[in-house]
Each structure stands twice: as C-alpha cells, then as structure tokens.
Amino acid sequence: MTGVEVSLRGLHRRYGHVVALDGLDLTLAPGELVALLGPSGCGKTTTLRLLAGLEDADGGQVAVGGTDITHVPSNKRDMGMVFQAYSLFPHMTVRDNVAFGLKLRRVGRTERERRAMEMLELVGLTEQAGRYAHQLSGGQQQRVALARALAISPKVLLLDEPLSALDAKVRAQLRDEIRRIQLEVGTTTLFVTHDQEEALAIADRVGVMRDGRIEQLGTPTDIYSRPATSFVAEFVGLTNRLNGMVTGGSVNVRGCVLPLADPATPDGQATVLVRPEAVTVSQSGPITGTVIAVTFLGASSRITVDLGDTTVLAQLPTLDATALPAGSAVTLAIRPDPVLIA
Amino acid sequence: MAAVRGLHARRQRRLNVFRYVVFTVFGLFFLLPLLAMLRFSLEGSTGGSWSLSAWGQIASYAGPPPLLSGVEITLELAVITCLVMLVLLVPTVIWVRLRVRWMTRLIEALCLLPLTIPAIVLVVGLAPIYRVLRQQFSLSALQLFWVYVILALPYAYRALAAGLEGVDVKTLSEAARSLGAGWTTVIWRVIVPNMRQGVLNAMLLTGALVLGEFTIAYLLLYTNLQVALFSVSRGTPNAGVLFSTSSAALLFAFVLLLILSYVGRRRGQSERSKVSK
C-alpha cells in the first residue's frame, strides 16, 4: 500500500461569526504523517473533518492523489478515520467491526474474514476477535478502531485525537504503535492532537495552528528548536519570558548576549523567549538567584530559580539538579542560541 | 460517625415505608377495578353466585360481525401500524439528533400533539376524508392504520428518543460514513441495532394502543377487536357479557404484549450471553 499526496488549498470554514479556518493551505507528501497541533478552537479538528468530508468547506479545495474531492460525500472518499470518542459499533464483535467496511465494499466473506484477522494481527488483537467493544479496554478499542480504519486500505488515514481518552502509559504505547503501523502500511496520515509531546514524537512534520491558519509547518526538531513565531515558541515546550535590551541584531539578557532569530528586530527593550534547556548552571554565569523548587522529570529535572524580580526555569540532568536543593544559591548562564522576541 | 449512620438508616427506613405505601396505593388503584370487572364477568344469575355463562357467550358468538375477523384485523393493524411508525419515526428521530438538533423541541411538540386532541375531535376531522376515500376506493378496516400511526406518535416518539439517549449517534454514524456506509445503512445497520430496547418499547406501546382502540374504529364504522367485542356484549341481555368481553380484550392485549416483551427480552439476553462467551 503506497500513500497518496493530499492537498488542502485555501480552506475556509465559518460557524456563524466564528472563523474556524481562514484560508488554510497544507500539503501532505505520499506516505507522510503530519500532525496538526494547536490550542482548542484553532481549527485543527475542522481541517480533519473537511478532509474526511464530514463537513463542507465554505471555500477552498481538497485534493487527494491529484483528484479534487471537495464535493465528494464522506462515504465515497476512501478514508479511514479513528475518532477521539470510542467509535466501535457496540452490537458487533471486534471481527465484525473490522470487516464492516469490507462488507460495504461487497468483499466476499472468506476474504473479509482473512483481511479482518490480518488487521487484528497488525494491532495485536487476534485473541479478542470474538469480543464486543464493552469487553475491551480503551486502548484496545482504539487499536480495533485503527484496524477497522486500515482494513479498507484507505487512501488517507485520519486520526482525530485518538489517544486523548487513554491513560499516560497506554497512550505512549499506542502512540508508538500507531507510528509503527503507519510506517508499515505507508498510508498518508493526518494526526490531530493538542498534546505537543505526542505530535513531536509521532510526526514527520508538525503543523502548529492558530486562528484557522498554520502558523508553522516543519519537522519536530524545527518546530521545537527553531520556532518561527513567539506563539509557536510558547505553545510548543516551556519558555521563559525574560526582559532584555536589543542592540544591533543581538539582545542582552541579564548580562548574557544572545543572537536574535530575527536580526531585523528594532533596538530597544524587549521580552525574550528562552527555553529552560538553554539556561545552564555555570560558576561564571552572570545571573545569580536562589533555587525555590526542583521538579523531578526522570532523567532530567527542572529547577525554578528566583531572580528577585522574576523567576526562571532551567532544565538540567537530574544528577546536577540533586546538588541544588531548594534554598541554595545558584549562578546561571544562557546558551547563545538564536532567540525570539515576544 | 455512628449518629450519622443512624440518621442515614432512619432516613432509608422512612423512604422504604414511603415506597411500599405508594406502591400499594397505586397497585390497588389499578387492580381493584380490574378485579371487580373480572368478578362481575363471573357473576351468576343470583346475586353472589358464580358462573361462566358470560364467558361462554363469547365462545359461542357467531356474529355478525365475526369475532375472529375482528381479532385478525386488529393483529394486522398492530403489525402495519408498528411498521409504518418505525419507518417514519426512526429515521426522523435519528436525523433530528444528527443534523437538525435545533428542531428537537418542534418535532417533540408535533409528536405530542395527538395527546392533546380527543379521539372524537380526530374522528370529526377524519370522517369526511374517509368518506370521500370510501366513495373512490374500497377501503378495508386496515386503512385505520393511518389514524393509529398518528395516535401512537407521542408514545412511540418518547420511547425512541429515550432509546437513543445512550447512543453516541454522531460518532457511530461518522465512523460508519467514513467506512463507506450510506445513510440508510447508517440508520438501519448501525444506529437502530443499538437502540433496540427503544424500538421494542415503541412497538409495545403502539401495539397496546392498537389492541385497545375502540372509539375511532367504531365511529368510522370499521370493525376491529374492540368493536367486535362491543357487538358481542350489545347483542345479549346478559349484563355480565359486557364485563367478560372487556376482560377478554384486556387479557388478549396483555398476553400478546407479554409475548412480545418476552421475545424481545429473550433476544436481548441471548445477545448478552453471546457477549459473555
């Protein structure tokens, strides 16, 4: 199964006075997994629903494999979809659920059963084939929903926050599983989520959305390390907001001179966005403060340092952080990565 | 802590007593007239004696109109009314839930409207229509199903709407649509099987209404079971027959609904047992 190109051009969608999509443009390469990330109401689910045909666009074009499908009804689009809510048909067994789309396509019984079992094997649920939805855990239900969506060999796979109802551990497991399966079958996939960790972990490219448009589309590394706008910087990952003085293409933050991501920034006072991992503990650092809290995150820990007029977050290896209990004095420096101005 | 538990226990006891009192009062309210009717149907020729003669007269009644044809027509009417009601109302209820939720109140009000119109008023409105149609076509008593569908609307609508309450209609229908299902498939193969109890309740209520309907059939000059039973009682000087025919009608409807309900429950149980395997 090879993926097809998906192209969304100038999509507009309004709900009364609320603009959900404002001329959205997005192209998914064949076999690519793109995650749409953004706050509630930014239009990410609307984008997915327009692509699925579950809603009509007010303007713009949806094309799959070069064919305009803007006005094709959802049941003729050949798209597999996994929903946020559990969507298995309660009156059917797991096997019947997976075979449902094939039955509608008049696939013979034997082939249908074979394909259903093949898909259940893919998601590791062959043992549960005879069970009903209410006998499965949330994670299992979403796996079956994925198998059901893939059983029809869809042109595009649409995942609408499929992990949001699951607990953290199952969520991480299933996230990895979705990626494995997607790479195995090679279906072009649009994944909608509000969880940045999920988006960054699973996607080939991440589109950060705001007010019905894509603010930045790039690889997870680009999005995190080189955010194009202050919105992206603040939405993806934690960010310190520190005062600084811009002069001649660089900014001085409490004695640390940092290059600007946008050298054309006018001189003057500015709020600078600095990632916690760019803040380092340094004997010779120009910033002095007092540790007020240490948050254990596993391999790394986050310390909150009181600078007198503000606080700053720094992310350190846990081993280093253990030497800095709350109340200890600390000197900090900021790594000279290009920074954004808020 | 113990005081709180004691207070809770006392409140629970009072609640239980209240429940039993309400249950008994309402039980008596419904049962006493029925028992009285049954007793009168077994009244002998002398006061206080017992006799089956009133029941025997039903068995020996030869018409006209024949009792059996009344039973037959009523059963056919019940089936047709149920089917038409389901075909009309199930897609409507689902469509309103899915696409035009703002119309819920309007549809509900429309469906409840027949409750506010007395049967006699309905007949006054319908009689000229039936008269005209009768002049053009030969209309059998089965044509009563049009009126019965209207009469059953309030009960059937409530039952179906309640049956739909626990179903995530939007997600299930969108999932089915994305898999390639047309709207007919979505409604009849995805949503309806999940609101089976609601459908069954709607059918039971509709069936009960048709089995017990007398006024409209009588005034429109058709013979159904109730009209036939009325004819039996009218054609005899034995007052007990009035009660025996009423009891017979009641028993007939009760047994039929019991069977329907039992069959529905059996299907539900067999599905559940399949699930637990």
Image (cartoon, coloured by chain):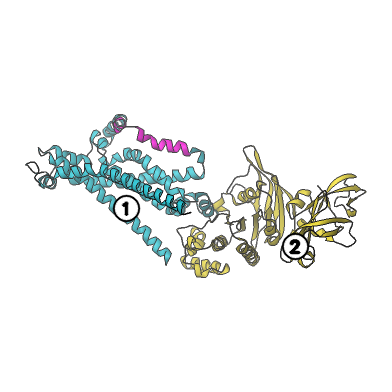
From this viewpoint, is residue B66 visible?
A: no
Looking at the rendered structure, the kind of residue marked 1 is: Ser
Please give the label number shown on residue B261: 1
Residue B221, image x, y percentages: 23, 35
User: What's the CA distance linking mark 1 and mark 2?
Assistant: 63 Å
Within 10 Å of disc 1 (Cα), the crowding (few <14, some 14-19, many 20+) is some
Q: Quadrant of residue B77?
A: top left
Residue A88, image x, y percentages: 51, 58
Magenta-tinted stretch: B104-123
Please tell me whether residue B7 belongs to the stretch shown in magenta. Answer: no
Q: Nearer the viewer, residue B224 or B33?
A: B33
From this viewpoint, is residue A289 visible?
A: yes
A330 relative to B260 in the view: left or right: right
Q: Nearer the viewer, residue B81 or B33?
A: B33
> Which color has been applied to chain B in this rendered view?
cyan
On what subunit does the disc labeled 2 rest? A
Q: Residue at x 70, y 51 (%)?
A: A26
Residue A328, image x, y percentages: 81, 60
**Which residue lies under the disc numbered 2?**
A301
Q: Nearer the viewer, residue B72 or B106?
A: B106
Helix, strand or loop under label 1: helix
